Amino acid sequence: MAIKKDRKRRKKKTMAKQADKFMLYQQSVQNADHEVEFFEQAFREQYNRKPYTLREDFCGTYAVCCEWVKSSSRRTAIAVDLCSETLVWGTKHNLGKLKKSQQKRVTVLEQDVREKNKPKVDVLAAQNFSFWIFKTRKEVINYFKIARANMNDEAIFVMDMMGGGACQTEDHTDKRTIIKGKRGFKYHWEQARFDPVTSDCSFYINFSFPDGSKLKHAFEYHWRFWTIPEVREMLSEAGFSASHVYWEQEDENGEDTGEWARCESAASQASWIAYIVATA
Ligand SMILES: C[S@@+](CC[C@H](N)C(=O)[O-])C[C@H]1O[C@@H](n2cnc3c(N)ncnc32)[C@H](O)[C@@H]1O
């Protein structure tokens, strides 16, 4: 009897083995409704009207496109990524949850972001530092030119950026509890490598579970660590007419408010996240 029980215990899969890495990623990293709100704010501040068309480059599971079409019956979205496994997951778990009338307004393109497509859009988003995959000025400027060609005459290009000395510390992992309790999990952002000569960097996303199991290197990124002034200069060289930096606002106690405002200068922080918004 004891042997039987032991076998059963050994057969039981760990929480890490049972986990769905894309679901964990979405719960930890993405806040699609916040992104949609921000696109709306940045577009309105530039053109004083509502944007209707979105192209999400490096879309992954295209949660933002799905949120976009949910936010207005006039809105359409184009999702672009070259990883078919990720897109298939998004189709099942994000697109699949929408009403049929909403699903029809999302187009999925399994291709490189460096392709020109029609129709052109009001908002082109490249989120989660994804264009950092391009490691030379030549590659970034080439991508920015193509992005601009995919945009309407009145349109914004939205990218997020991170920085601060703490983001460049090697062999450092930040851990956050995403869901508490026995069925919960922790998200780990591992800063594995930063080369001060080339600005090459490697980051990993790991997850850990209450049963002690871990999902190591569920996602990995090997990027160039670009800075805001470099990116703004490259946007200008690619033909964008202007770019604005949006910095998160703090309350009187120095706490982040979740509100974003344009700024031309900011106080140094150990780590920060900001948006760059360029106008076509
Ligand atoms: C950091 S993830 C970002 C996912 C999503 N945008 C987000 O905010 O969470 C980067 C994504 O870019 C895709 N990718 C990388 N290079 C690409 C390229 N040249 N063209 C299209 N997609 C690319 C990867 O397949 C991956 O899904």
Image (tube, rainbow, N blue to C red):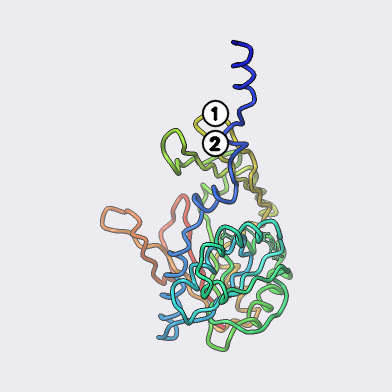
Q: Say which residue appears at 60% left-offset and 41% top-offset.
A: 170
Q: Say which residue appears at 57% left-offset and 76% top-offset.
A: 104
Q: Tell me the kind of residue under disc 1.
A: Gly
Task: Give the secondary structure at mark 1.
Answer: loop
Q: Which mark is residue 212?
A: 1
Q: Quadrant of the C terminus?
A: bottom right
When the figure is inspected, residue 152 is found, relative to residue 76, above or below; the finding is: below
Q: Position of residue 130 (x, y in %)?
A: 62, 61
Q: Position of residue 248 (x, y in %)?
A: 40, 62
Left or right, 221 with reference to 175: right
Task: State how far apart marks 1 and 2 are (Cα).
Answer: 7 Å
Q: Tell me the kind of residue under disc 2.
A: Ser
Q: Which residue is mark 2?
A: 208
Residue lying at the far top of the rendered structure: 2
Q: Say which residue appears at 44% left-offset and 56% top-offset.
A: 268
Residue situated in front as seen by the camera: 6 or 264? 6
When the figure is inspected, residue 229 is found, relative to residue 26, above or below; the finding is: below
Residue lying at the far left of the rendered structure: 252
Task: Give the secondary structure at mark 2.
Answer: strand
Residue situated in front as seen by the camera: 116 or 189? 116
Q: Which mark is residue 153?
A: none
Q: Position of residue 1 (x, y in %)?
A: 60, 11
Give residue 118's quadrant in the image.
Answer: bottom right
Q: For the image shown, how many numbered marks are present on the structure?
A: 2
Q: Position of residue 148 (x, y in %)?
A: 63, 80
Q: Say which residue appears at 66% left-offset and 57% top-offset.
A: 86
Residue situated in front as seen by the camera: 62 or 193? 62
**Callout 1–callout 2 Cβ contact below 8 Å:** yes
Residue situated in front as seen by the camera: 153 or 239? 153
